[in-house]
Amino acid sequence: MSYRVDELMNARVIGKTPMIVVRPFEDGAEIALKIEGNGAGGSIKDRAAWGMLRRAEERGELCDETVVVEPTSGNTGIALAMLGRGLGLKVMLTMPESMSVERRSLLKAYGAEVVLTPAGEGMSGAVRRADELVAEIPGALTMDQFSNPGNPWAHRVTTGQEILRDLWGRRIDAFVAGVGTGGTLTGIAEAFRGAGRSVSVVAVEPKGSSVLSGGRSGSHDIQGIGAGFVPKVLDVDLIDEIVAVDDEEARDGARLLVSRWGLLCGISSGANLHAAVVKAREIGPEGLVVTVLPDRGEKYLSTGLFS
């Protein structure tokens, strides 16, 4: 059966992103960087949005009257707004007011309605407001990215398979990924497991909101990860290790990406790189660490990330 959302995926080149392999330090392992900002919507969330809309279309839930309501830190919203516009759907997004101005502007450019929630409430506040809107608006449908199985499924069948093809024949010692919804880490780790690969899975979270490590939910500046709760789609049994990264370490990582390799990426990419470097030094020069760079850096220019 042909699905409209698949046609949009192919037309807008979602997925099929490039990868480069670098060695930041001579005494450490190589690090394979999957550059997700090169997708049509500028982030790895293009894949999750496709997967969730695909599942909704399979169930017959999408029609001209559908209003997609979703809590988002920005990138999922951008992807949903992009695909929603192509499908003729109205999209309404809730997000913390701490998210960058560029993200809000992109959402509005795609025609989405943006509803801001208090910064101190984090993503939990955005989720609550989205739930309220779904109850109030006729025809409202939430993708519920934090619990929608279409989120990790998209990474299992696309991102994970691409990484395996990109690194065909090479041993992968560790996979490092920040946890926002948990879809990226879960889906890719499942792809590795399905291929019979024994890979150490490292989850990255902000030190300011280290709930995976048993800490408290709190505020932090690493947009895109650290929602302040453990998402339902995150399979914690797949995680072998957790690395907590502070705001400045994430900023330094983003600045290293652009200064050393010319990769202008967002702050969560910096967090992933920092954790990947830590792991690469542990493993040593014969090893290989894989991580993803979730989005481009243009959305962060107003935050002073590259100042």
Image: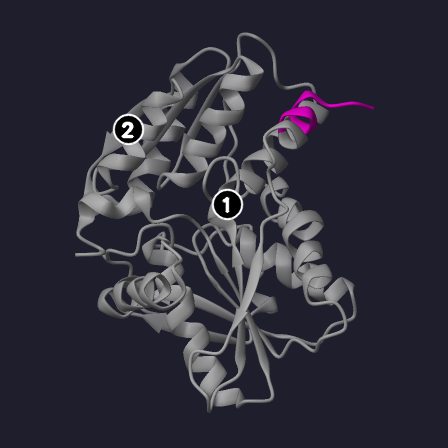
- Other residues around mark 1 within 10 Å, as few (<14) / some (14–19) / many (≥20): many
Q: Which mark is residue 291?
A: none
Q: Residue at x 38, y 59 (%)?
A: 262
Give the residue at mark 1: 38
Residue 245 at x, y = what percent? Answer: 32, 70
Q: What's the magenta bit mostly, secondary-structure-wise?
A: helix
Callout 1 secondary element: helix
For residue 190, say whether it is visible: yes
Vertical arrangement, residue 136 with respect to residue 226, above or below: above
Residue 84 at x, y = what percent? Answer: 51, 21
Q: Residue furthest right?
A: 1
Give the residue at mark 2: 105
State the image quarter where residue 221 is shown: bottom left
Q: Which residues are magenta?
A: 1-8
Vertical arrangement, residue 57 with respect to residue 152, above or below: above
Q: Amino acid at mark 1?
A: Asn
User: Disc 2 to disc 1, how far (Cα)?
Assistant: 19 Å
State the image quarter where residue 286 is shown: bottom right
Q: Amino acid at mark 2?
A: Ser
Residue 213 at x, y = what percent? Answer: 39, 71
Q: Looking at the image, do the residues carrying marks 2 and 1 touch, with CB atoms under 8 Å apart?
A: no
Vertical arrangement, residue 275 with respect to residue 285, above or below: above
State the image quarter where residue 54 is shown: top right
Callout 2 secondary element: helix
In which quadrant is the C terminus drawn?
bottom left
Q: Residue at x 77, y 62 (%)?
A: 194
267 relative position to 75: left or right: left
